[in-house]
Amino acid sequence: MSEANRKAKPRPIAGSLLLAVIIAFLATAWTWASVTELDEVTRGQGKVVPSRSLQVVESLEGGVIESIQVQRGQTVKQGDVLMVLNVALLEGTLKESRQRYYALMARSQRLRTEVLAIDEPDIELEFPAELEQQAPGLGASERELYRARLAELESDIEVLDRRLNQKRQELAENRVSIETARRAVILTRDEMSIMEPLVRQGLEPKTTLLQLQRTELELQGEVERAGYAAERLTSAIQEVESERRAVYRKFRAEALSDLSEVTSKMAELEQTLPARADQVARAIIRSPVDGMVNTLHVNTLGSVAGPGEPLAEIVPLDDKLLVEAYIRPKDIGFLYPGQPVRIKLTAYDFARYGGLDGKLTMIGADAVEVPDSEELMYPVRVATGDSLKDADGRPLDIIPGMVAEVDILSGKRTVMAYLMEPVVKVRDRALRD
């Protein structure tokens, strides 16, 4: 066969088909790479932080440590007892103050009843139920004093009443004497009017008329003396009545004066009692939040904690999880608050437990030096409300300090754009010094 015939022979069909397949594959790949989008992710490293700052537990007054109820790393609820300080002295002071207050309350009630008893002699002394329950002995002693005070008042009034009755009786007798003397004067004058004509006629001696005149003068003197005595008795009666009123006024004034003093002291105690009760309550050191005991500054029973001295540190454990991460400056321009974030906790295998969905909540205004590193990065914060769960659906503990990786979805781009990125960079830098 000649050379020309060999050249004229048609190509094998398999080669053409292979070429067509390759071209179709390249076209399909090009189309797929141009259309298919991939998530553009900005990655950062960080750790779980509490949504609230570390809670430092202190004792306002300080005291001797009587018991320690928790250990470092223990999870506590808000209000759980952490430590107990010795409260013997505080309780003694509080008890003494309460006894003083109840004593003043009983005295106050007695004084009020004394004031009312002046107008209502039969009134009974009654005490509040709280006083009867807390200090029944005080009520009994004040009742005895109340009866003694009223008995003394009644005794003083009885003495004055006897004097008053005596003076009134004397005044009544004096008035009878005056009336009798006046009638005697009238009768004597009548006798004189009869006797005078007889004396002039010489039928009776003149001495008889003189005797009647002398008798009239004596009776007139008795009337005048009795009148003066009546005035003195009336004045004495008024004086006794004034003394009687003065006794009541003095009794009332003393009761009101004492009541004012007692009320003032009660007001002072009403201000200090809650404070003393708070001191006793504060001797029981409680957790201010749900959290985990991070540090115990006091570990020895019987040691003395000074006023304001830190006793423990509680890391809050909230439903709201925050992750603080650091992003390289070259990636910060693509971030904005509200971007979706995927959080992976290194403490839990991502392939087994998955990750957490969150949102970017804060972007630092300036780059800062990363702790334990001299590299400058931007701090960001990510918040999430859900939690990881184990195979049984139970939430896994996520505590502050756990290392986390954050993937921030900063955009999308095609596979072609991703593959062409090195070419674009080379093109942009080409032919430049």
Image: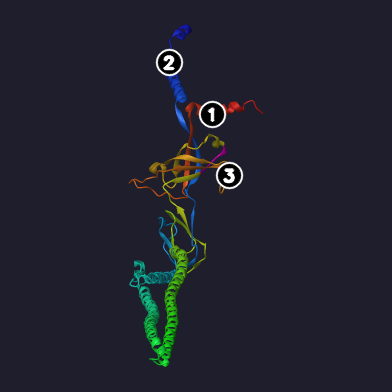
Give x and y (percent) for residue 15.
Answer: 43, 17
- What is the distance, in whole Å, between disc 2 and disc 3 at their CAs? 62 Å
Tag 3–tag 1 contact (CB < 8 Å) = no
| Residue found at the far right of this picture | 433
> What amino acid is labelled 3 in the image?
Val
**Magenta-colored span:** 325-329
Q: Name the residue under label 3.
A: 368
Marks 2, 1: nearer the viewer: 1
Q: Quadrant of the C terminus?
A: top right
Question: Tag 1 or tag 3, which sits nearer the N-term?
Answer: 3
The residue at which mark 2 appears reads as 16
Q: What residue type is labelled 1?
A: Glu
- 2 or 1: tag closer to the N-terminus: 2
Q: Which residue occupies the foreground of this view, 416 or 399?
A: 399
Q: Is residue 328 magenta?
A: yes
Q: Which of 308 and 128 is in front in this view?
A: 128
Q: Nearer the viewer, residue 130 or 388?
A: 130
Pointer 1 residue? 421
Residue 3 got which mark?
none
SS label for mark 1: helix
Whichever of callouts 2 and 3 sits on the residue coming sooner in the sequence is 2
Is any atom of residue 300 visible in this view?
A: no
